[in-house]
Image: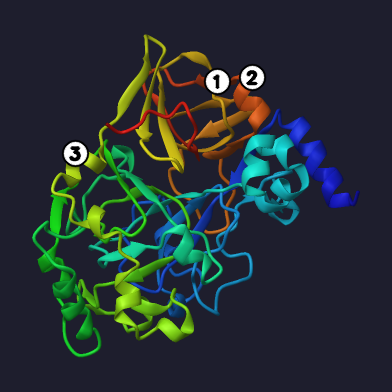
Amino acid sequence: MNKKQDLIKEHLEKSGGILNLIPVFDPRRFGSAGHRPKLHPDDYYALGTKRGSIKERWFSSVICPMNGTDAAEDEGLSYVNLTGRLEDKISLRDFVNTLKGELIGSALYDKYGNWPMYSKFFDYEGPLFHHLHLNFEAAARVGKLGKPEAYYFPPQYNNYMGKFPHTYFGFDPDVTREEVKERLKGYTDRDTRITELSRAYRVELGTGWYTPPGVVHAPGSVLTYEWNSDVNSVYENICDNEIYDYSFLAENCPEDKWHDLDYILDLLDWEKNVDPHYRKSYFRPPITIAENEQYTEKWIAYGNDYIAAKELTVQPGARVMIQDDTPYGCILVQGYGKIGAHNCACATMLRFGQLSQDEFFVSYDAAKQGVSIENHSSCEPLVMLKHFPSNSLVPRAE
């Protein structure tokens, strides 16, 4: 066993199985930043203007984003704060690779060989393009993971709703495959206006949606708590006055399929895209699972086999013990207090590269034994969002 592995094992024990993670902010080459994730105004171009502004914060990540050849090798990876000094950090990926089932549970590790999900805040001032995420089979053809996706819209981070707080999902039930293909034929010649074939829903804070792989969607201009990998096909070539070249449509296709529109259309799950009851099938209002004078806990992502999330609200002055049957990452969005032996506090403003007390990863054993959470405020609730792989206890959609 090497020195790094020794440090990892020692730190897991010393931390009580709860890891303080260092904030991860990612730039994107498209869109305009919404300026809502508590990042200092001077730091939105911390990696240079060529990389685009920072629009996302990633949580519990062991993967890297599709940020091109200019991205650092470890861009997007979460790191564990070991000593309070940035130079001593070790990646969450290294923790998983070293500790395996000791960190995430043997069932999860045996099934995936890794921590199988990540979460993020994405934050755009305007709407995003109409795009889909590949299913696991299509993604495997280009060496990537498929992406089921879920959203939740936290009120604490949405003091304003941006320029277009509406999200498109799928296509109108009367739209045909040939109509969509005809739009894509003009991808490099004209504005395809593909959302003319879709349906939009106004964003409702404190609720969310589940989006299966293969369903096109164009998220609205609201800071969104979102889950899973990073692999897509962009069907909309002009959005919010930005032009997207053909690579956005085809970059996650095998090289010999780049100009095969039938292959690109086959990335769609057609029946789900034209579901006449789309809202009934995929809208996710919160489900309260516990409520008393001390705390309230709700499912906010559920009804699928891949990803899940809860919102925990602890009342002023309360101390609670919360058990879960799986490891999870979490982000504090309001209040301050303690999680296990760690001080925790919602960030007011962060500098790029700064440590924080708002993000944690809870190991399998710690989650099963129960985590002590204290609210040290006399007047304000402590609110925590918790993200983890789905499991048998997550309620199913009807």
> Which quadrant, please, contains the C terminus?
top left
Query: Can residue 194 be spotted in the picture?
Result: yes
Q: Picture coordinates of residue 330 (x, y %)?
A: 51, 37
Q: CA distance from mark 3 to mark 2?
A: 36 Å
Which residue lies under the disc numbered 3? 280
Tell me if residue 78 comes above or below residue 251 in the rendering. above
Regarding residue 333, the answer to whether it shows in the image is: no
Mark 2 = which residue? Answer: 369
Q: Please tell me which residue is depicted at 37% across the width and 9% down the height of the picture.
A: 293
- Please state if 18 lies on the left or on the right of 183 as rendered: right
Q: Position of residue 85 (x, y in %)?
A: 71, 50
Q: Is residue 61 above or below residue 327?
A: below
Q: Which residue is mark 1?
A: 323
Q: Pick whichever, 47 or 153, lies toward us.
A: 153
Q: Nearer the viewer, residue 94 or 283?
A: 283
Task: Determine whether the residue tagged by mark 3 lies in a helix, strand or loop.
Answer: helix
Which of disc 2 and disc 1 is earlier in sequence? 1
- Disc nearest the viewer among 1 and 3: 3
Amino acid on which the number 1 mark rests in the picture:
Gln
Residue drawn at 30 percent across, 64 percent down: 268
